Image (cartoon, rainbow, N blue to C red):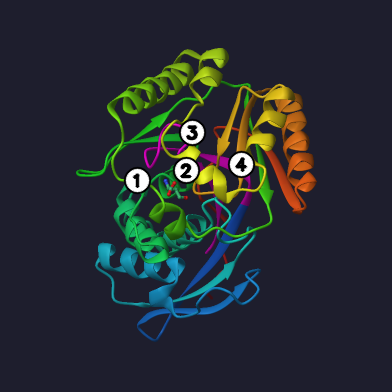
């Protein structure tokens, strides 16, 4: 089974660890095959420049595959091949995409014993191995597609949100690496009540904007007063990149996941492209190469893109 899983934008400004959405591209691909020898083996990883571990226990795809076997109560063997189509440490949910693609591929190989939502515990465990915390705001949208709210972690309660038809995303990826674990370590674990009030207003405002199809409300709500100000220092020229997106007509702009990628939401494809180009030229102005992707929100979650006939 060959499965594609998309990149994801986590946090979406005010929704640290609770909001995320899938984009159309980039994304990772994982091929899973049944094997005689029990256990999970990763045969090869393409596109990572040799950076990721082949050892299944240390790799998100390997851990996700192992956990799906356990959840399904199967003992068989699995071989995986991982094709990375996005950089690690980019803030695009790279580890989540590989884990989700592996989980969906293994579940499909087994004949689909688990519903997509039932794969989430396996995926949280894979995220924990990848970055030290089991956050769901990348894996849930990579799995389910579209825009997802993690209403609660204990118990896990994940809600799919609608997205207005003309809502597009531009992603700019300055070519440097930020490890999620490092970007989490610098956060304070206490917040001021007055900041929390602003953040709650923006989180609820964004959800209301999506439900009402109110683009101006979505734009006003893309404001993070707790996490973005701390992490912005990790991204050279962040204030200038954000200003460039807003000047080009974006509704709002913030850090994608733990960075360094920056996302902007815009109404329509043309406005999103303009925001993407403006962000990229701001990034390049600070001496860093930059990749740009533009896609509508509400994209598909992980899905099978090919199957080999074992016979
Ligand atoms: N919510 C997570 C964080 C996403 O911001 O640390 C990491 O991609």
Label 1 residue SS: loop
> Looking at the image, which residue is at 39% across and 59% down?
127
- Which residue was labeled with disc 1? 188
Percent of width and height locating residue 270: 76, 26
Percent of width and height locating residue 80: 50, 73
Sequence order check, earlier mark of 4 and 3: 3
Percent of width and height locating residue 216: 56, 13
* Quadrant in the picture for residue 16: top left
- Which residue was labeled with disc 3? 13
> Looking at the image, which residue is at 40% across and 26% down?
203
Percent of width and height locating residue 125: 32, 61
Front residue of 24/250: it is 250
> Looking at the image, which residue is at 30% across and 50% down?
118
Q: Main secondary structure of the magenta part?
A: strand
Residue 52 falls left or right of residue 68: right
What is the distance, in whole Å, between disc 3 and disc 2 at their CAs? 13 Å
Task: Please say whether residue 145 is visible from this viewpoint.
Answer: no
In front: mark 1 or mark 3? Answer: 1
Please tell me whether residue 23 belongs to the stretch shown in magenta. Answer: yes
* Quadrant in the picture for residue 87: bottom right
What is the span of residues highlighted in magenta in the rendered image?
Answer: 1-26
- Which residue was labeled with disc 2? 230
Mark 3 nearby-residue class (10 Å; few <14, some 14–19, many ≥20):
many
Label 2 residue SS: helix
């Amino acid at each position: 089974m060959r499965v594609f899983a998309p990149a994801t934008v986590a946090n979406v400004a005010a929704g640290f660890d609770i909001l995320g959405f899938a984009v159309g591209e980039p994304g990772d691909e994982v091929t899973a095959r049944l094997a005689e020898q029990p256990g999970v083996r990763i045969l090869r990883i393409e596109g990572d420049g040799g950076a990721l571990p082949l050892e299944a226990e240390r790799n998100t795809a390997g851990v996700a595959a192992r956990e799906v076997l356990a959840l399904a109560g199967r003992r068989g063997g699995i071989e995986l091949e991982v094709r990375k189509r996005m950089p690690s440490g980019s803030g695009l949910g790279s580890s989540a995409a590989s884990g989700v693609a592996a989980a969906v591929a293994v579940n499909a190989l087994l004949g689909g014993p688990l519903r997509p939502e039932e794969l989430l515990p396996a995926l949280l465990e894979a995220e924990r191995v990848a970055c030290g915390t089991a956050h769901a705001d990348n894996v849930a949208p990579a799995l389910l597609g579209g825009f997802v709210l993690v209403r609660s972690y204990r118990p896990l309660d994940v809600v799919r949100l609608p997205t207005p038809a003309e809502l597009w995303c531009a992603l700019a990826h300055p070519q440097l690496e930020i490890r999620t674990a490092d970007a989490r370590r610098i956060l304070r674990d206490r917040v001021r009540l007055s900041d929390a009030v602003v953040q709650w207003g923006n989180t609820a405002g964004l959800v209301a904007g999506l439900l009402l199809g109110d683009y101006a409300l979505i734009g006003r709500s893309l404001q993070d007063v707790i996490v973005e100000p701390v992490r912005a220092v990790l991204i050279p020229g962040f204030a200038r990149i954000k200003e460039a997106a807003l000047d080009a007509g974006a509704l709002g702009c913030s850090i994608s996941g733990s960075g360094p990628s920056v996302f902007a939401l815009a109404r329509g494809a043309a406005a999103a492209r303009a925001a993407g180009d403006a962000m990229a030229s701001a990034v390049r102005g600070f001496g860093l190469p930059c990749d740009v992707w533009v896609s509508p929100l509400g994209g598909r979650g992980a899905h099978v893109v090919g199957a080999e006939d074992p016979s």
